[in-house]
Image: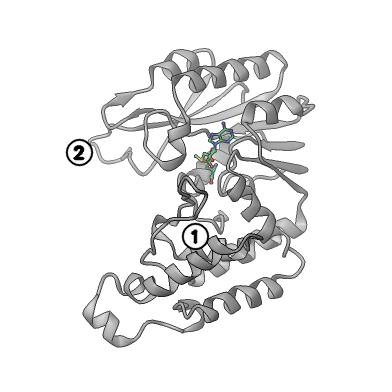
């Protein structure tokens, strides 16, 4: 499985091996309506890919990184220029933190070492009107929990994290660039309803829906409520009436909460149980309070 180089919150990377087994075998256009970091489309075989997300900065990041598809070397040169200019650590190149930091802060030495540089880079990014999205990418990679978070005035405001530019990031970037070089991927930034309604879809196409989960907490879930949940299911019913295949990831139960809108609606379709981090299928002694599901309107 390929992991997106954005290491995005809610990333489907760990579940993709189960999900792709349940995706339709032959896909003409793969329609990712809530693409996030893109770990979904990166692991699917299709003739072409549409990747949409409402977050404009995330889409700008996809466009920025994929613009280097034919020239990965130029991307890494620029990335290392930024890292060196701001004097950030870089495990991949062996530019690690001084031993004294490791001894003094055994569990947080990356964060402690990079903090000042990170704040300078963040200022640099925020004060530059023609925003350099490669700088934003580096801020994401070195940032706390690798999130894209902005304040009300539109300034990036994530604090430094305890991570740096390492082999996992380099591998993810290389895999992403190869995918972009070999495939036709179009990015867009729209509300998923407008995005889906704009497409002329047929029976060989496939719409994958990975929305914010109503009953779990994260930055992008703030935009999601019961009304949005109901609207989503109305749209999926409409796709079903038109004979267009869809697959929906979601959570039926989580930490004592239940998504009863989903529970009721999903009875019309096929519900697959997905083994997630929260669930232990093999060990009954672990309390399973979460149920990740994949709902489809097609037979495998
Ligand atoms: C769970 S994440 C998707 C994760 C992704 N499938 C992956 O594997 O990396 C949900 C995404 O939905 C986006 N989103 C939230 N509301 C949306 C809307 N109304 N239309 C389109 N995208 C939306 C968020 O910005 C977020 O990136």
Reading the image, the residue beneath label 1 is 140
Q: Nearer the viewer, residue 50 or 26?
A: 50
Ligand 1 position by quadrant: top right
Q: Position of residue 39 (x, y in %)?
A: 57, 49
- Up-down relation of residue 182 to residue 231 (above or below): below
Q: Position of residue 66 (x, y in %)?
A: 70, 58
Q: SS at mark 1?
A: helix
Establish whether ligand 1 lies closer than 8 Å to the Cβ of label 1: no
Reading the image, the residue beneath label 2 is 285
Q: Is residue 299 left or right of residue 139?
A: right
Q: Nearer the viewer, mark 1 or mark 2?
A: 1
1 or 2: tag closer to the N-terminus: 1
User: In this view, which residue lies farthest toward the bottom?
Assistant: 99
- Up-down relation of residue 154 to residue 18 (above or below): below
Residue at figure coordinates x 60%, y 73% from the top left: 79
Q: SS at mark 2?
A: loop
Q: Position of residue 122 (x, y in %)?
A: 48, 65
Check disc 2: other Cα within 10 Å, few if <14, some if 14-19, many if 20+. few
Q: Nearer the viewer, residue 122 or 287?
A: 122
Evaluate whether residue 168 shows in this view.
no
Evaluate whether residue 31 shows in this view.
yes
Q: Position of residue 265 (x, y in %)?
A: 49, 14
What mark, if any, has residue 190 been given in the picture? none
User: In this view, which residue lies farthest toward the left?
Assistant: 285
Residue at figure coordinates x 63%, y 35% from the top left: 33
Check disc 1: other Cα within 10 Å, few if <14, some if 14-19, many if 20+. many
Q: Quadrant of the C terminus?
A: top right
Residue at figure coordinates x 56%, y 54% from the top left: 1
Q: Is residue 143 left or right of residue 174?
A: left
């Amino acid at each position: 499985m390929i992991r997106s180089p954005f290491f995005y919150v809610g990333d489907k990377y760990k579940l993709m091996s189960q999900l792709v087994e349940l995706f339709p075998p032959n896909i003409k256009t793969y329609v990712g309506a809530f693409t996030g970091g893109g770990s979904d489309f990166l692991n699917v075989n299709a003739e072409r890919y549409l990747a949409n997300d409402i977050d404009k900065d995330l889409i700008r990041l996809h466009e920025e990184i994929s613009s280097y598809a034919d020239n990965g070397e130029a991307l890494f040169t620029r990335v290392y220029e930024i890292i060196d200019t701001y004097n950030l650590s870089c495990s991949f190149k062996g530019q690690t933190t001084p031993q004294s930091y490791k001894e003094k802060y055994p569990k947080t030495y990356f964060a402690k070492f990079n903090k000042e540089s990170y704040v300078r880079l963040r200022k640099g990014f925020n004060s530059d009107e023609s925003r350099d999205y490669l700088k934003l990418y580096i801020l994401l990679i070195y940032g706390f929990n690798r999130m894209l978070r902005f304040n009300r005035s539109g300034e990036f405001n994530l604090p430094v994290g305890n991570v740096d530019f390492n082999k996992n990031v380099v591998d993810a970037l290389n895999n992403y660039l190869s995918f972009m070089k070999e495939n036709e991927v179009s990015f867009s930034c729209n509300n998923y309803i407008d995005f889906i309604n704009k497409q002329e879809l047929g029976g060989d196409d496939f719409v994958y829906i990975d929305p914010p989960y109503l009953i779990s907490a994260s930055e992008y879930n703030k935009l999601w409520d019961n009304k949005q949940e109901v609207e989503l299911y109305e749209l999926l019913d409409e796709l079903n009436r038109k004979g267009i295949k869809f697959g929906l990831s979601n959570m039926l139960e989580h930490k004592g909460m239940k998504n009863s809108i989903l529970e009721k609606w999903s009875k019309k379709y096929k519900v697959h149980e997905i083994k997630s981090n929260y669930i232990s299928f093999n060990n009954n002694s672990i309390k399973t309070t979460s149920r990740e599901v994949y709902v489809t309107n097609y037979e495998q």
